């Protein structure tokens, strides 16, 4: 081996002189090659843009969405028990306070019909899947492993975030699309 041999910046294979593409991974050699820096997490020495805070942001979204969803699921699934508990508490009150709470309970029962509660339960279930997908995506993005799996989970978390309402939908989809794009761009960082 001579000291003048060139190596592929993506896979580390030896590049024969005059080649336009790497014979192992197909990387075009016409573009400027990144500097090589060797480390334990990057054994072939590719210098690439790191993901930075992307995994942490994805995990944070996942945890927040999972907690929000679990609280929502609990409330929707236990609605009747909670209303009965409020009614029992209101019965111990007297006068205007009791009347106000009983009116509130009646309004809640009229607003949150069985159909509305069923839809709320489904929405919370969808958001829970979004949150759990984000947690797994962030975990693997942090480890820089399983690129396709990580990218797919991030895209699923983003797509399912449309179950949120109003302005939050726009924010979650925009941020999720950006996170998915950052993972897509970082393919070379991933070990598998």
Image (spheres, rainbow, N blue to C red):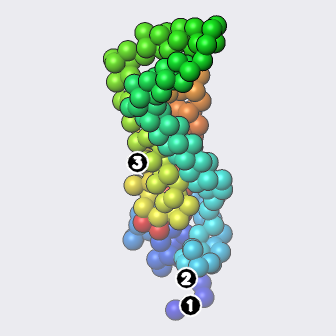
Image location (x, y in percent) of residue 167: 59, 22
Cα distance between the residues tagged 2 and 3: 38 Å
Q: Secondary structure at mark 3?
A: helix
Image location (x, y in percent) of residue 142: 56, 61
Residue 100 visible to the viewer: no
Is the C-beta separation of discs 3 and 1 under 8 Å? Answer: no
Residue 78 marker = none
Cα distance between the residues tagged 1 and 2: 6 Å
Is the C-beta separation of discs 1 and 2 under 8 Å? Answer: yes
Task: Report crowding for label 1: few under 14, some 14 to 19, many 20 or more residues within 10 A (C-alpha).
Answer: few
Residue 98 or 15: which is nearer the viewer?
A: 98
Q: Give the mark, 3 or 1, whose residue is nearer the N terminus.
A: 1
Cα distance between the residues tagged 3 and 1: 43 Å
Q: Quadrant of residue 179?
A: top right
Q: Is residue 45 above or below residue 155?
A: below
Q: Secondary structure at mark 2?
A: loop
Which residue was labeled with disc 2? 5
Image location (x, y in percent) of residue 153: 42, 48
Which residue was labeled with disc 1? 2
Tell which tag, 2 or 3, sits nearer the viewer. Answer: 3
Q: Quadrant of residue 118?
A: top left
Q: Quadrant of residue 114?
A: top left
Q: Quadrant of the C terminus?
A: bottom left
Q: Secondary structure at mark 1?
A: loop
Residue 7 placement, left or right of 163: right
Residue drawn 63% across the image and 8% down it: 95
Residue 76 placement, left or right of 94: left
Residue drawn 39% across the image and 55% down it: 149
Which residue was labeled with disc 3? 152
């Amino acid at each position: 081996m001579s000291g003048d041999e060139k190596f592929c910046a993506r896979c580390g294979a030896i590049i024969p002189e005059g080649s336009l593409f790497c014979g192992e991974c197909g990387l075009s050699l016409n573009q400027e090659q990144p500097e090589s820096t060797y480390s334990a997490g990057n054994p072939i020495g590719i210098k690439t843009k790191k993901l930075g805070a992307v995994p942490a942001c994805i995990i944070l979204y996942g945890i927040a969405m999972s907690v929000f969803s679990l609280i929502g699921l609990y409330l929707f699934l236990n609605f009747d028990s909670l209303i009965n508990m409020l009614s029992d508490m209101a019965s111990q009150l007297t006068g205007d306070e009791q009347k106000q709470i009983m009116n509130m309970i009646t309004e809640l029962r009229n607003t949150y019909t069985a159909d509305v509660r069923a839809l709320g339960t489904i929405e919370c279930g969808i958001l829970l899947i979004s949150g759990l997908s984000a947690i797994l995506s962030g975990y693997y993005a942090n480890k820089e492993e399983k690129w396709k799996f990580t990218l797919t989970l991030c895209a699923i978390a983003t797509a399912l975030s449309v179950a949120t309402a109003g302005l939050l939908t726009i924010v979650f989809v925009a941020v999720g699309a950006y996170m998915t794009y950052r993972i897509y761009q970082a393919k070379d960082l991933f070990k598998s």
